[in-house]
Amino acid sequence: MSTHIGAKPGEIAETVLLPGDPYRAKWAAETFLQDVTCINEVRGMLGFTGTWNGHRVTIQGSGMGMPSLSIYVNELISEFNAQTLIRIGSCGAMQEHVAVRDVIIAMSATSRNTPSSGIFKELNFAPSADWELLQAAVKAAENTGATTHVGGIYSSDTFYDERADLFEQMVRHGILGVEMEAAELYTLAARHKRRALAVLTVSDHTLNGASLPADQRERSFGDMVEIALQAAFAA
């Protein structure tokens, strides 16, 4: 048991999916896993362990933003020996050819600042996904038939960002979407020599204002979870 995760030794699998929303963790566990057990309720940040096609999987909520995710990922690695960590979440599209309901597989994650920034000092570290996971996710996406985009994303440290100039440069340089967690996940995975990936569903569009209605989000998130699970256990 760690400070923020109340699981006992052995209750967390080596493969962990990380939605930000704890209720999305509950939905994903109940929808995709068998023999599910709730292994964490500390601060309402729900976590569940079960099996998918015979493989043990934990789905643990990570909260909103990089500081929150950093807490959970650090504890999952240091206290529970998690080896593969895949963020499953929503994002906003930043390119015209990316549509609501599409899936983005994040090859890299640009950011202005992360909880790890201080240790790099003047260095601009470039956090990126695990190559084998990335390859496996692309193949899995072909199996699901989901419209998928692979490339760089932007991990913002603010939800209500008023830097229009920064936004314009992200679009100009081909950033596919914006979310709030992946850059720190990739950095921690690199530091601790673990596998990490972010598979994201586009829930809204920053350029044209399109958005996915709340009652349709769970159905649309299914492809993302399936891709993440297939990638995690690809031969």
Image (cartoon, grey):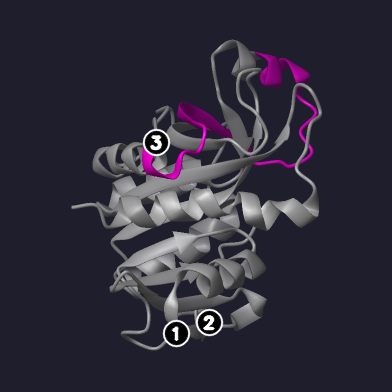
- Return the residue at label 2: 40
Q: Nearer the viewer, residue 92 or 70?
A: 92
Q: Is residue 227 magenta?
A: no
| Nearer-the-camera pick, 132 or 217 | 217
Q: Residues within 10 Å of mark 1 (few under 14, many from 20)?
A: many
Image coordinates of residue 223 in percent, x first then y, are 51, 49
For the question of whether residue 182 can be seen, the reply is yes
Task: Residue 34: name its quadrant.
Answer: bottom left
Relative to 31, say whether 3 is above or below: below
Q: 145 or 127, which lies in front?
A: 145
Q: Residue at x 54, y 13 (%)?
A: 173
Element on which disc 2 rests: strand
Query: Percent position (x, y) of residue 131?
Result: 27, 37
Circle 3 residue: 127
Kindly check if marks 1 and 2 are in contact, taking CB atoms under 8 A apart as contact.
yes
Where, quadrant-wise, is the N terminus in this rendering? Answer: bottom left
Question: Furthest residue to the top?
Answer: 172
As drawn, 109 above or below 176: below
Residue range (magenta): 142-168
Q: Is residue 67 left or right of residue 11?
A: right
The span from disc 3 to disc 1 (Cα, nearest Å) is 29 Å
Mark 3 and mark 1 lie on one chain; the one further toward the N terminus is 1
Q: Name the residue at 31% across, 55% down.
A: 232
Q: Which amino acid is tagged 2? A: Asn
Using residue 127 as the reference point, say whether residue 146 is left or right of it. right
Left or right of 209 in this view: 34: left
Q: Of callouts 1 and 2, which one flags the residue occurring earlier in the amino acid sequence?
A: 1
The residue carrying mark 1 is 7
Which amino acid, by three-letter code, is at mark 3? Pro
